[in-house]
Amino acid sequence: VLKRPAIPVLSPVGSNNGQLYNINADEAASMVAARLKAEKLVLLTNVRGILRQAGDSNSLIPTLSIKNAKRLLEQQIIQEGMIPKVNACVTALRHGVKKTHIIDATIPHALLLEIFTKTGIGTEIVRSTFCECPSSSRRAGRPRTPAVPTTNKTIKIKQICIALNFMGTCI
């Protein structure tokens, strides 16, 4: 399937003895990205990313390490529907995915803006950051790590796995 010029769509539905089960799209996408050895896992949602203050889009945290993501979970700054997304990102990173992103799919061109700009528009979660502090790299005057590979190679389909959780679809 991955050798064809198409994007496979995976529906996160399981079954057991004829009974259908809805599987969390973030968890499914995380495991698919890990098995594919994806470069990136991008989770699309209807909020900007991880917010320091719920409901305040100005409190967006642009970059987090696994360590700081866990700390924010413990402090209950990350809440409700963002918890499975962050856990999926951490799982993917621990299984070899190089970088993960949580972005707002309602923003026009969100994926392009996140992947191909220095500052992005959502939250990236990485294994570790140059500064183990959850402060905004934009406010500190430092762009986050480069989003575009430094080689001229074309990004292959298997290198990016996207979960569209708000639509219940994993791409």
Image (cartoon, rainbow, N blue to C red):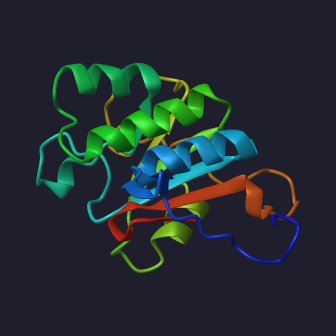
Can the viewer see residue 65 in this picture? yes
Pick whichever, 17 or 91, lies toward us: 17
83 horizontally vs 110: left or right: left
- Residue at image point 59% right, 25% down: 94
- Quadrant in the rendering for residue 105: bottom left
User: Residue 48: percent from the left, percent from the top?
Assistant: 30, 59
| x and y, in percent, of residue 106 in the image | 33, 75
Q: Position of residue 24 (x, y in %)?
A: 39, 50
Work out which residue is located at the far front of the displayed protein and give it.
Answer: 17
**Residue 115: quarter of image:** bottom right
Query: Which residue is more in the foreground, 81 or 17?
Result: 17
Q: Is residue 60 above or below residue 5?
A: above
Quadrant where the N terminus lies?
A: bottom right
Query: In the rendered view, does 75 fall on the left or right side of 4?
Result: left
Q: Is residue 170 left or right of residue 57?
A: right
Closer to the camera in the image, 6 or 106: 6
The answer to whether residue 133 of the structure is visible from this angle is no
Image point (19%, 54%), residue name: 58
Q: Residue furthest bottom?
A: 108
User: How many circles with numbers are drawn on the protein?
Assistant: 0
- Quadrant location, the C terminus: bottom right
| Residue drawn where x is 86% and y is 74% of the image | 4
Q: Position of residue 12 (x, y in %)?
A: 48, 58
**Does 54 sit left or right of 130 as displayed?**
left
Q: Residue at image x 38%, y 38%?
A: 86
Q: Is residue 132 above or below residue 116?
A: above
Examine the rendered structure and indicate whether residue 142 appears above or below residue 18.
above
